[in-house]
Image (spheres, rainbow, N blue to C red):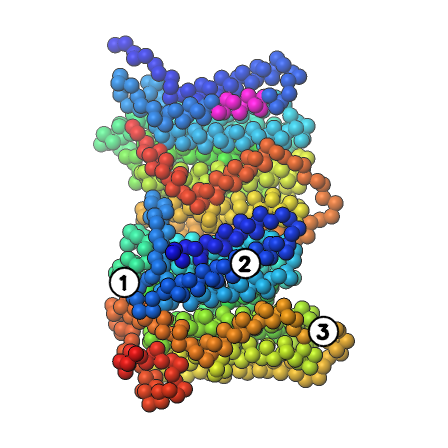
Amino acid sequence: MPWLTLTIFLPLAGVLFVLLVPRGNETAARGIALATTILTFAASLGILASFDTNAPGYQLVDQATWVSSIGLKYAVGVDGISLFLVLLTTFLFVIAVLASFRETPNVRALMATILALETFVLGTFLSLDLLLFFLFFEATLLPGYLLIAGWGGDRRASAAIKFFIYTMAGSAFLFLAVLFVYFQAHTFDIRVLSHHAFAVSTGRWLFLGFLVAFAVKAPIVPFHAWQPDAYTEAPTGALLILAGVLPKIATYGLLRFNIGLFPEAAQHFRGLIEILALVGIIYGAVVAIVQTDLKRLIAYSSISHVGFIVLGLFAFTQQGVSGSVLYMVNHALSTGLLFVMVGLLYERMRTRDIGRLGGVASVTPKMAALFLVAGLASMGLPGLNNFASEFLVILGTFGANKVWGSIAAVGVLLSAIYFLWAYQRSMHGPLRDEHATASVRDLTRWEYLVIVPVVVVILFLGLYPKPVLERVNPATCRVKLVYQSAPTPLDCGPLPIATAAHGTRGGGWTMYAPLNVRVDGSP
Amino acid sequence: MTHPPLDFGPVLPELILVGAGLALLVIEAVFKRLSHAWLAGGAFAGILAAGWASVWLWNWTPRAFQRDSAVLGGMVAADKFSVVARLVLLAVAALGIAFGHHYFRRTGEDRGEFYGLVLLCTSGMTLIASANNLIVVFLALEILSLSLYVLTGFSFRLTATEGAMKYFLLGAFSSAFFLYGIAMAYGATDTTSITGIARALSGSTGSDALALAAAGLLAVGFAFKVAAVPFHTWAPDAYQGAPTPVTAYMSAATKVAAFAALLRVFNVAFAPLQWDWTPFIWVLAALSMVVGAVIALSQTDIKRMLAYSSVAQAGFILTGVTVAGQAGIKASMFYLVAYAAMIVGAFGIVMVVSVRGEDRTSISSYAGLARTHPALAGALTLFLASLAGLPPTAGFVAKVGVFGAAVNAGEWPLVLIAVLASVVAAFFYLRVIVIMYTQEPPPGEPVIERATGPSIGIVLVGIVTLVLGVFPGLAYHFLDQASVLRW
């Protein structure tokens, strides 16, 4: 069964069906979109089921020559790194379609755009061909842009243009780099390219070309100027994708291409990138503290979180890299949920201004409680999903450089400040009159349908990240092969965490057991 | 020595076009009451016949007594390159007629000469694509230019007359350059045959100064026709002033024809001097991309915006031309095919939207088009996205092709300029999309008339734009053979 191809193109087939729906029949369009995303999610579960945890390399590969004259191949494959990003994508798109059900006008166009975006995002994660990756990467731009421009807030036009121009400018360099890679190595195949030794200076230039594109898309400070506006203006459902999934394309690209193809350059620029990541962590968190708009606050917090992901990737330790991959999944879930909650809050209160909110918890206690859950998950409370990944990233960074690790830990502290302070001011305290008079309802059954699945996954990954880690680890460990050409090989051997775990087996650490298996040799 | 019998097969498409064009002019003059639908039908029939003749030429081989594929005394080349160029030009002509038939009826300016003129103009264009002698190139250039001057002014509006006048004056100027270039080439090599010049230059050991001057002057002549900076000044006025169907036709067809001739002249005649002329094309390409994209940013009229954007597009195509040899020809040809499809589509929609005549061509009048006419807005989005070079459209694959060829040839600084210019270009294409999708339609807009013929044409080029984007292999299959210029 070509699971990967099926998963990638199911949504595109859905686009056709949505467009065939006669105009005006909005319910049918929504229904088809929901059914398509659910089917796609089911297909991605098929990938998970056929995935062999112990097999090395890319699995379930489908390939065919597409355009021989420009060397373009259709080649898709999955490994531990992309597996969960794909599952995350298919899962979040179901939620995104649900969350977009009340979005008007032009329902057909909205649903078609979301579904098209799903195909493109899945394509980027699964491509084994560099040009194919670029094609999908570029293709995400237009639907992303249309979602903001078509269904966004009041200042959507400028936000959408900013989003587009920044990303497009970044990918211009990616484009040039991709072409250059081809004429250096005469192939676009990632599997071949990862064994290709680029000349040192060529590799460094190419690394920078890829870096600029991904740094804009992620975004990494100082390439983030488009992000707060785009996130603030985007509609809730689309935001789940824009803020949850799209940045992961960039961080995935950093791992797969920047580190995977140019290990020497990655080593060379490591310090620079780690510092940018740390600046992002602290800057995002500090700016988030002073925000008055809740949506903008989460947007800035997202900059901080992306900083963590990048930090872990370039820590060059296995905990760091594995933690980052896990973080990509977790950040999408917790930030996505936060944006959904803010969207619901806005629908009721008609404002996101922290100064004009207050006491919301007394009117809608359930909504406030779930908002708290989302926030706590985002700030890394133990037992919720972000904790595991944040812990691994900081641990991994600490193992590489104690100063960097300590600074990153400060970021965790700041995240508690911005979220809890904002939560306290907006949800607790005296009830404002303007709200009290409004007939505000608590969460409806429909809204639970959007929220509960996400919360369940957040809890699951918080308590039991092992299924994810034990599939991610072999893949991140394989990155080591590439590092061996670098001055310091990736540490894939005994892990600092192991000694602690060894003593307290069955205790608190067992949830990271996969990281220890290799150490004490027992399965 | 007796001449071998002449075989007119290789110019059969041109003969058909000229014959049909003249016949239409006569018929129109004799039967004044005849419905113009008949004339349009006759023009389609002529184009179809010429298309059939072109397809037939794909597998045409010279007979034993003819030495090579340069036939009719070496005046034309019967290669697959010219077949591809012909087919593209004929398709564009058919669209131009479909658009024009609808448009001129709507504006009340329907005159029968239109159909004959388009066919004659197209015959010049197809001839220039297969010309193997600079004199024939010049003749074809004049045939197409004279027809285009008339077509540009084919409206009672003052702006059309103004555009035609500017086009005519600068065009005449460029013809002089071109002719002077031919004279220089003749002086340098004692021949005006394209293959003859190549033979003479590759054998020469002396100074190439005269030949270089010839190459430069010919390049200037072509640069006028393709509207490359700094020889682009006629384009915005002519594009904006001309009736929109004519703009659609000439923006696509003139570029295809002129680039086809440019590719042949420089890759065959001046192939021995390629290290000398590539820098010149390099500069033209860089200037066109940057100046075209930047000036297009500030335009408020969509036709003028597209005109400047086509200047930038000429720069992108020239990027492919800087790569001498088959790789460059193939990439440039693909870009030309894609460009013809997307620019005709874009102008076609501009024509449909501009209700009566040339009103509603300001970009702001596209506000809310997605709300009122989702199909038109969707199609325009496709064409603009393709012009901006976004996947999965033909524009993206075309850009990959030319930029890839240029990077491979070591021209990455030019490609860097090109990708950055593409970003700027993306901005103004996108602005139109934003306005269509995000703004409210102004109240009391005139109703857009149903346009069956143009709609069919637009749907077809839309399909081409998408199919070339998703399955470019279909086109490359033919271009692989067509990019070999035989001599």
The location of residue A319, given as percent across then percent down, is 36, 77
Nearer-N-terminus badge (3/1): 1
**Magenta stretch containing residue B487, yes or no?**
no
Residue at left 55%, top 31%? B96
> What residue lies at 67% left-to-right and 78% top-to-bottom?
A364
Q: Is residue A268 in view? A: no
| Left or right of residue B121: residue A315 | left
Q: Position of residue A506 (x, y in %)?
A: 37, 87
Pinpoint residue A252: horizontal percent, then vertical percent: 41, 65
Please state if A67 lies on the left or on the right of A35 as rendered. Answer: left
Report the magenta residues as a range. Answer: B39-48
Reading the image, the residue beneath label 3 is A440
In the image, taking residue A455 as reference, residue A476 lies left or right, namely: left
**Amino acid type, residue under disc 3 in the picture:** Val
Examine the residues drawn in magenta and state their main secondary structure: helix
Question: For the residues tagged 1 and 2, is the chain the same?
Answer: yes
